[in-house]
Image (cartoon, grey):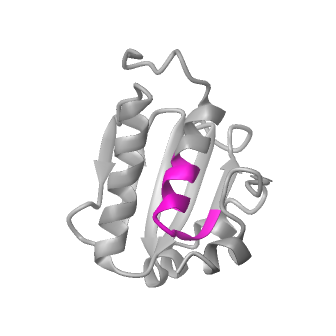
């Protein structure tokens, strides 16, 4: 099991596990941003949208579970009780899970638009394949 500094996994690997966890619970509008050049707060931001308070809790819970399985401990969680957004701080990776309204209000997509958006197509379920699951 990794120690609190998450030395066994790179920031990119941590971010990709978070993206996969969010995708597995059908998060919408998933984005992985490389923000190291713009801020000292984190290397990567993971942005996702949930359709309901219940889904937002499920999404953040899945991220926490999958990263814990990989030996990565969350440093801090904000907003879990309000149901419209959750911020999970993994030091080098910040995971933001929003309702549609909160995502539009905070507009992190625009705020960090000068950062590099990482192509996640190879680590998420293709939309057409995902739609045929039901």
Q: Residue at x 47, y 33 (%)?
A: 91
Please state the horizontal and vertical placement of residue 41, each as a whole percent of the image. Answer: 54, 39
Q: Position of residue 37 (x, y in %)?
A: 74, 39
Range drawn in magenta: 18-30
Q: Residue at x 68, y 70 (%)?
A: 110
* The N terminus: image quadrant: top left
5 lies above or below 118: above
- Judge whether residue 28 is colored magenta: yes
126 horizontally vs 41: left or right: right
| Residue at 66% across, 57% down | 124
Q: Tell me which corner region of the image, top left, top right, bottom left or bottom right, holds residue 79.
A: bottom left
Q: Does residue 24 belong to the magenta stretch?
A: yes
Q: Residue furthest bottom?
A: 101
Residue 3 appears in view: yes
Q: Is residue 115 left or right of residue 51?
A: right
Quick one: 98 or 107, which is closer to the camera? 98
Is residue 84 something that shows in the picture?
no
């Amino acid at each position: 099991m990794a120690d609190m500094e998450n030395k066994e996994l790179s920031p990119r690997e941590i971010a990709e596990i978070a993206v996969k966890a969010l995708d597995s619970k059908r998060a919408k509008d998933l984005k992985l941003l490389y923000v190291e050049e713009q801020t000292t707060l984190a290397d990567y931001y993971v942005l996702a949208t949930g359709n309901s308070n219940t889904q937002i809790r499920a999404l953040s819970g899945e991220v926490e579970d999958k990263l814990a399985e990989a030996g990565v401990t969350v440093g801090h969680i904000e907003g879990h009780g309000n149901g419209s957004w959750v911020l999970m701080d993994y030091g080098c990776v910040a995971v933001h899970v929003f309702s549609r309204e909160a995502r539009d209000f905070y507009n992190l997509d625009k705020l960090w638009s000068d950062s590099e958006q990482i192509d996640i197509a190879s680590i998420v379920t293709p939309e057409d394949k995902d739609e045929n699951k039901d």
